[in-house]
Image: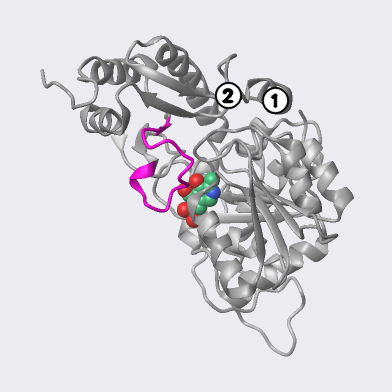
């Protein structure tokens, strides 16, 4: 695919894997820096009323954000730059603020657990009607968006693939149906990244990212971003960021842009590793179930093949032997890191239901594997060795 909105000066025909390298660069001139400067200033010289594009105060705007915002805007293919936020949750809170007090919000029953928690909070504090849906069931989602009392939802929130169940939504059908009903559509594109899925191409109104994950990619920053196609929505997100002070530090943004430069290589390698590991795990006698949209037998496979440019690098794994076996596996790996979060260069795994706040419909024994960019044979040996040592239902035998 080619980008419809390239960064300034970059030809229209470049692919996303070129944009990650080329977008958000300073103007070219003899002796100019190839990389944007790291600007550390909370305030800027100003007299009278500053022009709209003139920086004045660091909570409102700072040049430190612009290169990253321009690059992510170009990658998502929308008409406007991204808005960087202090975390993915700050960006999500801004997007969910588009639902007015007393309004209606439809969101996946399986999505990032803190997004679910925030929706519950909105229900309690602002009287927002929240409906949880199986995002893969298009008819049920659209029925929920339409509502049964002539009160359509204000916002349909989509994660695809979902965290941690990896369900895949029919995004074009959901956007068309939601718009017909009068609802906005917001998509958390963290799992796919814009290299694999660009929700604006399917008509979504808002896209958010936990930049903490693949975009920054090195498990060293917490950061978020939100994008909108409509200037009025963009302005509302911008105003939310300014008023709530949900802003990013200049150094975090600088690190995220540095990480973004290798996104294509990292995602390509991580996805290839994930598909290979998912195939091998599916054959392993001590594995009860593997979820990965790249496996032909996975419920999300056909949709992912049709709508995405890849299958992502997350695997859902249920070892035979239940939650105890899952915990034992996490304790037994040596190369994989037992840790939360995802999307870093290193492979991590965790049992999601260890958190009391995770949805109760997520199986107790589900491990979420975030596959990194290490050598796939090393990753496999470590996992296979830990699986081989599982005494089903108890623990790992040490050797
Ligand atoms: C899909 C998804 N969206 C959003 C978030 C929240 O991002 P952050 O931790 O940067 O606030 C996460 C965090 O795990 C996530 O997995």
Q: Which residue does the image show at 79% across and 36% down from the upper left?
A: 172
User: How is this picture coloured?
Assistant: one colour
Vertically, is 119 above or below 302?
Answer: below
Q: Are marks 1 and 2 in contact (CB under 8 Å)?
A: yes
Q: Which residue is mark 2?
A: 293
Q: Position of residue 164 (x, y in %)?
A: 49, 38
| Quadrant of image for the N terminus | top right
Residue furthest to the front in view is 148
Task: Give SS at disc 1.
Answer: helix
Where is residue 170? Give x, y as percent: 73, 33
Mark closer to the chain start, 1 or 2: 2
Q: Local crowd at mark 1 within 10 Å, few (<14), some, or many (≥20)? A: some
- The numbered disc on residue 303 is 1
CB of mark 2 near ligand 1 (< 8 Å): no
Identify the image quadrant of residue 127: bottom right
Residue in the image at 20% along x and 20% along y: 391
Q: Quadrant location of the C terminus? A: top left
* Membership of 351 in magenta stretch: no
Distance Cα–Cα, label 1 vs label 2: 9 Å
142 relative position to 309: left or right: right
Question: What are the residue bounds of the magenta stretch?
Answer: 353-370
- Whether residue 354 is in magenta: the answer is yes
Query: Residue 382 got which mark?
Result: none
Left or right of residue 240, residue 52 in this image: right
Q: Position of residue 324 (x, y in %)?
A: 25, 32
- Residue at image coords 70%, 49%: 73
Q: Is mark 1 within 8 Å of ligand 1?
A: no
């Amino acid at each position: 695919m080619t980008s419809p909105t390239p960064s300034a000066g970059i030809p229209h025909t470049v692919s996303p894997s070129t944009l990650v390298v080329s977008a958000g660069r300073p103007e070219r001139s003899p002796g100019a820096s190839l990389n944007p400067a790291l600007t550390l200033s909370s305030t800027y010289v100003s007299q009278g009323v500053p022009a709209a594009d003139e920086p004045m105060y660091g909570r409102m705007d700072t040049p430190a954000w612009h290169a990253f915002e321009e690059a992510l805007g170009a990658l998502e293919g929308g008409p406007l730059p991204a808005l960087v936020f202090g975390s993915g949750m700050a960006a999500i809170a801004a997007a969910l603020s588009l639902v007015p007090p007393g309004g209606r919000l439809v969101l996946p029953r399986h999505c990032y657990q803190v997004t679910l928690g925030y929706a519950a909070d909105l229900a309690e504090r602002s009287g927002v009607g929240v409906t949880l849906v199986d995002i893969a069931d298009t008819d049920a989602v659209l029925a929920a968006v339409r509502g049964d009392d002539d009160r359509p939802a204000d916002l349909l929130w989509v994660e695809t693939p979902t965290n941690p169940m990896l369900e895949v939504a029919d995004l074009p059908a959901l956007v068309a149906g939601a718009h017909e009903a009068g609802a906005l559509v917001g998509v958390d594109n963290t799992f796919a990244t814009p290299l694999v899925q660009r929700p604006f191409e399917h008509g979504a109104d808002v896209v958010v990212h936990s930049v903490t994950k693949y975009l920054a990619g090195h498990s060293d920053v917490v950061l978020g971003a939100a994008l909108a196609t409509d200037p009025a929505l963009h302005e509302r997100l911008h105003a939310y960021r300014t008023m709530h002070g949900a802003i990013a530090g200049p150094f975090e943004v600088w690190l995220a842009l540095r990480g973004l430069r290798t996104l294509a290589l990292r995602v390509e390698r991580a996805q290839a590793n994930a598909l290979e590991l998912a195939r091998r795990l599916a054959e392993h006698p001590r594995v009860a179930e593997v979820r990965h949209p790249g496996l032909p037998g996975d419920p999300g496979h056909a949709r992912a093949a049709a709508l995405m440019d890849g299958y992502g690098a997350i695997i859902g794994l249920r070892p035979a032997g239940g939650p105890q076996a899952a915990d034992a596996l996490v304790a037994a790996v040596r190369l994989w890191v037992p840790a939360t979060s995802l999307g870093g260069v290193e492979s991590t795994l965790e049992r999601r239901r260890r958190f009391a706040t995770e949805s109760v419909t997520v199986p107790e024994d589900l491990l979420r594997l975030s596959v990194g960019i290490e050598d796939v044979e090393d990753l496999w040996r470590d996992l296979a060795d830990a699986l081989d040592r599982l005494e089903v239902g108890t623990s790992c035998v040490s050797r």
